[in-house]
Amino acid sequence: MFGKRVSAVYLGMFAYLLGAGCVAATPEIATVTGTFSDGQTITITGKNFTAKANAKPLLYWFADGGTAPSALGRKTAWDGPFSGELVDKSVGAILAPGSGKAVRQDYSVASGAMLARVSFSSDDLYVWRKRYDDFDRSKDYAIRTRYTGLKQLGSATVVKEGMIVSSLDKLVFGKIIKSEPGVNGAGTAYYTNAFGNIGDNAIAGKLALNDKINFYDANDTLMLTPLFQASLAEGSGVYNTFNHKIIRIWGSYGKSLNNTYVSLDKDGAVVNENTQVGTFWRGGWDNPIDSATERWVVEEFQYRAGTVDVADGIFLYWQDRVQAWSNHTFRFTTSTWPTKYSDLYQTQVSNGAQPLSYEYFDSLYVDDTWHRVLICSESTWKSCVQPEIQIPASWTDTQIKINLRLGSLKDPARRYYFYVVNGNGEVNASGPINPCPLCPAKVK
């Protein structure tokens, strides 16, 4: 049941259902009717869809509609300030197939989470989104030195972009792309990865706390006349980082913030910063998911709050329907941190990146239940790769009406299959196809 591309319900979920007096039953689709084009109403009939208290999702946003959430969701405004710029092809933006706009953010100049906060009050949460990393975290990481005791040696009065920095023996050197002056001779310099060797750990790793560095004019490439000298003020001497958190859920407790986040790299992990039993490292996942480097990915997250002091919380993650893990539970709350999560944030890079390290978002769907409807061009859920989320307008145990959105699947010659996931996380294994002249009414 827990294969790479299966919408798996965690084994502990079945215990939960049985304890609640419920038995999960797989949705069955009998008919799909309506005009098959964007924005049209499609009616799905069948059984075991399970009742949904609010038919509309909590929030639905897509870039082609602007920066505000769509009126097809219950939230028509974000719960915090929006981060990112709306772009199209006129500025060379990278757009998802079938879309005319995207929102992007350059992580070298902005460290806040993209889009905006989405607040929720439910025990369950489901997230579907489409994003693209226009960077390679293995090369576009921030290169940083913190320094102290800055001493002026030449005519320059401030450390600035373009200056060359080197160790006293000139064996380690680089060029500043961003300078952050502090007080009393302290500051931070960030470096380009296109000049020098300061980004090479094997070389720069020889520098350490309190080692001296010199600052030179941008044109002094032979490093003959130092303008400043300072001491390194960080234990590793030179610090390299691409701290890319792909999703974060928060809960406030007084003035403190409890949170869980996911990162993707060779040392990727799921981290419950204040309540975890232990870090869930990427090496222990069923499928170690890769970063979305130069590719559009569809990502899904499924969360259920756990019990205070018990590691029974559920958090599942799929990228292009590959499931990262199945048999793992989390401790989200403790007696010290008893408040459940209430806020959702998207991707973030802390501590900088190389210039033009853009992240793109095409769309985001958030709901406070696990119910959802998706379409794929594959006839079985197991083989589905990049499902497109549909926007429900009404929902009962036997009938669902959706606002059809094709997304990247806008191709009249293509076959589309419908999948309903009910509130228990169960989904029909094969999909009735859309009512089109080229297609049968139902998959045999």
Image (cartoon, rainbow, N blue to C red):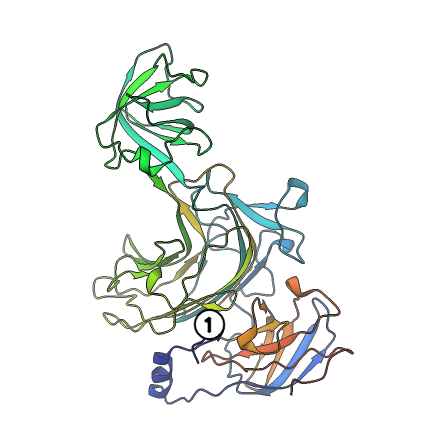
Of 167 and 110, nearer the camera is: 167
Tell me: residue 289, above or below residue 82.
Answer: below
Name the residue carrying label 1: 4
Of 358 and 282, nearer the camera is: 282
Q: Residue furthest top?
A: 155
Residue 326's spot in the image, x, y percent? 38, 73
Residue 325's spot in the image, x, y percent? 39, 69
Q: Name the residue at 69% across, 67% down.
A: 39
Look at the image and tell me in which quarter the N terminus lies.
bottom left
User: Identity of the amino acid at label 1?
Assistant: Lys
Write down the quadrant of residue 111 in the picture. Answer: top left
Residue 186 shows up from this direction: yes
Instruction: Tell me if 78 is positioned left or right of 243 in this view.
Output: right
**How many other residues sit within 10 Å of disc 1, few (<14), some (14-19) or many (≥20)?**
some
Tell me: residue 104, above or below residue 76.
Answer: above
Tell me: residue 8, above or below residue 153.
Answer: below
Q: Secondary structure at mark 1?
A: loop
Instruction: Tell me if 210 is positioned left or right of 375 in this view.
Output: left
Residue 378's spot in the image, x, y percent? 61, 74
Write down the quadrant of residue 337 in the picture. Answer: bottom left
Q: Name the residue at 62% across, 45% down.
A: 93
